[in-house]
Image (tube, coloured by chain):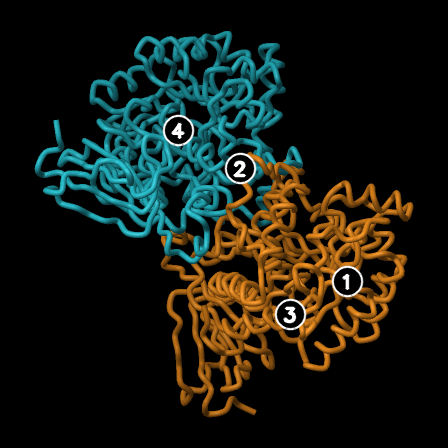
Chain colours: A cyan, B orange
Amino acid sequence: MGPASSSIVYRAAHGVIEGRWVDEPWLAVDEGGTITALGHAGQAEPPAELLQRDLGPVMLLPGMVDAHSHAFQRAIRGATHRRGAHDPSSFWSWREAMYARAQTLDPEGVHAITRQAFAEMLRAGITCVGEFHYLHHQPDGRPYADPNELSAQVLRAAAEVGIRVVLLQVLYLRAGHGQPALPEQRRFCDADVDAYLRRVDDLRSRGVPLGLAPHSVRAVPRPALLEAIRYAHAHGLPLHAHLSEQPRENEECRAEHGVTPTRLLVDAGACERARGLTAVHAVHTTAEDHRLLAGQHVCACPTTEADLGDGIVPAVELRDAGVEVALGSDSNAVIDLVQEARLLEMDERLRGQARLRLCDERGRLGPALLHAATEAGASALGQSATLGRLGVGRPFDALTVGLDDPFFEGIASDHLLDALMCAGTARAVRHVFVGGQARG
Amino acid sequence: MGPASSSIVYRAAHGVIEGRWVDEPWLAVDEGGTITALGHAGQAEPPAELLQRDLGPVMLLPGMVDAHSHAFQRAIRGATHRRGAHDPSSFWSWREAMYARAQTLDPEGVHAITRQAFAEMLRAGITCVGEFHYLHHQPDGRPYADPNELSAQVLRAAAEVGIRVVLLQVLYLRAGHGQPALPEQRRFCDADVDAYLRRVDDLRSRGVPLGLAPHSVRAVPRPALLEAIRYAHAHGLPLHAHLSEQPRENEECRAEHGVTPTRLLVDAGACERARGLTAVHAVHTTAEDHRLLAGQHVCACPTTEADLGDGIVPAVELRDAGVEVALGSDSNAVIDLVQEARLLEMDERLRGQARLRLCDERGRLGPALLHAATEAGASALGQSATLGRLGVGRPFDALTVGLDDPFFEGIASDHLLDALMCAGTARAVRHVFVGGQARG
């Protein structure tokens, strides 16, 4: 079947189509926003009777997938870099500042800041975001009339700006081992795991794209962790958790359970499904942890992990152990997955004092870093069948990068993708499409 | 004396004037491009009879000073991130790729690529660059008819795009201890230090802003190093040298001289003048090296030092030892001193696993990082009396950052500079002025 007559054919100078770099790609997109045919220079031309749209001197790439965001933290961009009465000189004191801001947000405030962050994401070529959402209840912890009120505000913000969202609904129950939630954590907390799962049931019944996110082994006791994992597996939902972001989390886990956070998750069954788990950060992990995570995802968030003094994700060791590394904008101080991808590689160069750390099996770095920003994220969010890749039958979620930007002047076409991913930013993103609709 | 009648008054919403963050700054600039008066909200208004120009919702900052550039290396942006027949997986094999490109450039080629790099710098708010220039002669090492032909091409490129340049004229004599120059290094090399100094004399006689740059302790034997240092001191010229970028340089220096490269430079008299020396990189330096460099500059180039697998500049230790840390774009794969400043801090957070590493004495980070990108660079290039700061009697070298960029939406004015320097890029640079002329 050829594309319907209401289709549009998009053309670009270069692009990554079906995972391959090609010259003069074209894609036919039907009125529902699905790619119905594609090709590139040297192959058959697209049907001439279709409306043609040449996007100009650009490279066309799959839309990027941000696998870990806390949208509301966009509200403290620039606000935690100063000594004073409150001195955010560690991860933990930074967290106090972040909590203080979180306390001030009412439903409209959550909507407004989320919309702002999501709009920035779209402009930066991010077409799908995994929102790791833990602002659930009123500041004192009492549920809103709709217990999913704030989740609904996140979904509303996404719908308004036109970005896809997978709601990674967070389970948060305590401050730590034997410690009830701090006052400023109360709005993150459900009464128990059953209350949490009732909210999840409600969202599932509304058809919301979902993942289950026990916040961390610190915030979720083992029995509740087991229940959340069981639920995720039973319903085929992605499972996300913060993991080993700070050494203190490891120490506390060892004191409570006698094992690393990774071992605790694995023993609780988190890795029973291939590609079912996304461990966020995994900075302070051991070689044994890396082996345990084989076949799963780690989500690295390099700009946040630097900002918060976490450390460098051991992406080389994880890759070598068979872990798929995705990317997240996390605190959203920086919203730019090109920078996240670049720093994933560059921080590994700093750590290993050598170059070319994360090349794919063909020795290519640009495609490997683009994969982290697209397909790996789609897989982490349980969307690999549809997102992260431009191909027939998939939605036209795409971005273009303007090659007439002086940044690219004089660069051979064969090096454009490497230049973008190893030296660039999302600055040169020009067009953004989600499901065939122009956005950004 | 008030400003002349041909002066223009520039106004902005916020800015850093005379080193201080102020609201509603104004500057009167005469027709020669010199600042003749200034003020801000709550002070006297500027003379109403002058032509007024409101730059709009922007922050006005001093033009940035890039203290270390190899403009021609812009030609290999994106070209060294792939395994293959040539495998640039280390600093040294990257250098082979860079040398191969350097071999292909004729005078017009040097002019073209330098012009391209300098134009990008201006757009990114860099108004003065220290060009560490070592492409001197024909590819086989024979001088051009004008032995300063390629220096002249660099100066021509700068004049054409309107950026200030300080030519850091490089002395290069050998591949290493007991090793003559490699064939691909011949065009960097003068016959001896006297031939080099004759070229320097010639440039001085033409009034070119100059610094002396013995390339490294690897490329310059000790007697020539002594002569270059003596000349720089005799003529009050800045002295620049690569220092301890890679461990191998340290090992070779220890084998040849029995000391660290820093100790060798210091014993050769390089630190005899306060703020006379700029050591570029200083990554693999000891606590003793840091003490020896007190009162001098280090130029850090974080994006290049990551790209090449060098490592992290110990900026905290250097600062604590009394070293002024400036910034350079170095290989020019990335041309963005906001990113360099941000990564100076962020890489230190990765190294120390703590936040707020480089705050100034008032506990402020934004101003400290802006200082590195402006005043420290001006000092490293011997231009602190005129550049790096907006003040009466100084040239109007400035940039503005557009605060209507969505990046800044919702950020309190008191946090704008921190947001830019700790999370931003040069993307939002809007206006650039050099000596009062609009550029970029």
* Label 1 in the same subunit as label 4: no
The residue identified by callout 3 is B151
Q: Position of A162 compared to B48: left or right?
A: left
The disc, 1 or 2, on the residue closer to the chain's N-terminal end is 2
Residue located 38% across and 14% down the image: A193
Q: Secondary structure at mark 1?
A: strand
Classify 10 Å Cα crowding around label 2: few (below 14), some (14-19), many (20 and above).
Answer: many
Residue located 59% across and 21% down the image: A285
Q: Secondary structure at mark 3?
A: helix
* Label 3 in the same subunit as label 2: yes
The disc, 1 or 3, on the residue closer to the chain's N-terminal end is 3
Please report, as a chain letter, where disc 3 is located.
Answer: B
Classify 10 Å Cα crowding around label 4: few (below 14), some (14-19), many (20 and above).
Answer: many
Where does the image place residue A403, in percent across and percent down from the top left? Answer: 37, 52
Please state, as top left, top right, bottom left or bottom right, where the N terminus of chain B lies in the image: bottom right
The residue identified by callout 2 is B82
Q: Nearer the viewer, residue B265 or A112?
A: B265
Contact (CB < 8 A) between labels 1 and 2? no
Q: CA distance from mark 4 to mark 3?
A: 48 Å
Please state, as top left, top right, bottom left or bottom right, where the C terminus of chain B lies in the image: bottom left
Q: Amino acid at mark 2?
A: Arg
Q: Secondary structure at mark 2?
A: loop
Contact (CB < 8 A) between labels 3 and 2? no
Q: Secondary structure at mark 4?
A: helix
Q: Amino acid at mark 1?
A: Leu
Q: CA distance from mark 3 to mark 2?
A: 32 Å
Q: Amino acid at mark 4?
A: Gly
The residue identified by callout 1 is B277
Q: Position of A338 compared to B68: left or right?
A: left
Nearer the observer, disc 1 or disc 2? 2
The label on residue A377 is: 4
Classify 10 Å Cα crowding around label 1: few (below 14), some (14-19), many (20 and above).
Answer: many
